[in-house]
Amino acid sequence: MKKKLAASFLLGVLTVVAVAGAVIAAGNIKLIINGNTIAADVPPRIVNGRVLVPISTIAKELHQDVRWDAKNQAVIVNPDIWKSEMDISRPEWVSARNKALAFFIAYDEQDLEKMQSLLSEDFTSDREFVYNGGVTGRIVDFRFRDLAYVDSVWRMRVQVVFKGDRDVLKMEDWDFTFSGPNIYQGKIASIQISNERELTEYTVFPGLTVDNQHYYK
């Protein structure tokens, strides 16, 4: 997806946070993300009145993809997944987004009739979403990653936190494709799951943490 805003970070790779007030001893600086105190492999430090913290630590805790681009000497956070063959308009993005949202809601509410209405007749997936008349898990959270028109197909990636059978908590990439060249009329033609990784817990926001034993912690 073509991004109007992009940011590169040089590999010294420390995120800068402005500091107001008196100087703070480096050993006393805490890194708190989503209400949780995080131990960084490189401790935060103050340089010229600014707090520097490792961007890799922050990115990992926020489940962001970070890559090193050796050619351009840059650290890229959330790199572009696909290069779209055309610019994507706001209405096209909203239409694709809403189809995925409708699927997620129908899935979590076990509305099988609504789910089927969103899928094309030749829908394919590497996961069995419906088993013995019911859905096979619950969606905890999700984040849209990319939308692109590639090889005459609309593709969208959504990062999903999924609670499956046997209380297994996972983060996964769900790749949606849509039928037809027109995103407005197209249905969901495929959902392929990749990059599965198990989580011990996941914080939706401060005060709500899901673990792999109970739905709410």
Image: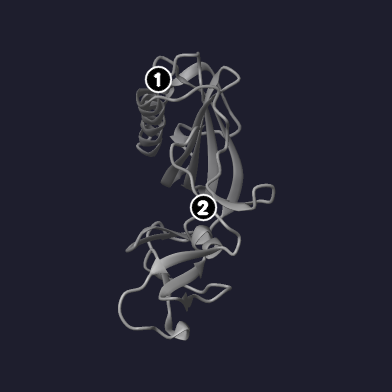
At 57% from the left edge and 74% from the top edge, which residue is drawn? 42
Quarter that holds the C terminus: bottom left
Q: Is residue 98 above or below residue 53?
A: above
Q: Residue furthest right?
A: 71
Q: In the rendered structure, which disc, 2 or 1, sits on the residue that comes first in sequence?
A: 2
Query: Is 36 placed left or right of 85 in the picture?
Result: left
For the residue marked with disc 1, what is the amino acid? Ser
- Residue 76 in the image: x percent, y percent? 56, 50
Query: Is 202 placed left or right of 9 in the picture?
Result: left
Residue at which label 1 appears? 117
- Tag 1: Cα neighbours inside 10 Å, few (<14), some, or many (≥20)? few
Task: Decide which of 202, 157 is in the foreground and name it.
Answer: 157
Q: Quadrant of residue 192?
A: top right
One can see residue 16 in this view = yes
Q: Is residue 128 above or below residue 205?
A: above
- Residue 7 in the image: x percent, y percent? 49, 48
Q: CA distance from mark 2 to mark 1?
A: 33 Å
- Residue 36 in the image: x percent, y percent? 41, 69
Task: Decide which of 175, 118 is in the foreground and name it.
Answer: 175
At 59% from the left edge and 64% from the top edge, which residue is drawn? 12
Badge 1 marks a residue whose secondary structure is helix
Question: Depth-wise, is mark 2 or mark 1 nearer the camera?
Answer: 2
Residue at which label 2 appears? 64
Task: Decide which of 3, 217 is in the foreground and name it.
Answer: 3
At 64% from the left edge and 52% from the top edge, which residue is drawn? 73
One can see residue 131 in this view = no
Mark carried by residue 20: none
Badge 2 marks a residue whose secondary structure is loop
For the residue marked with disc 2, what is the amino acid? Gln
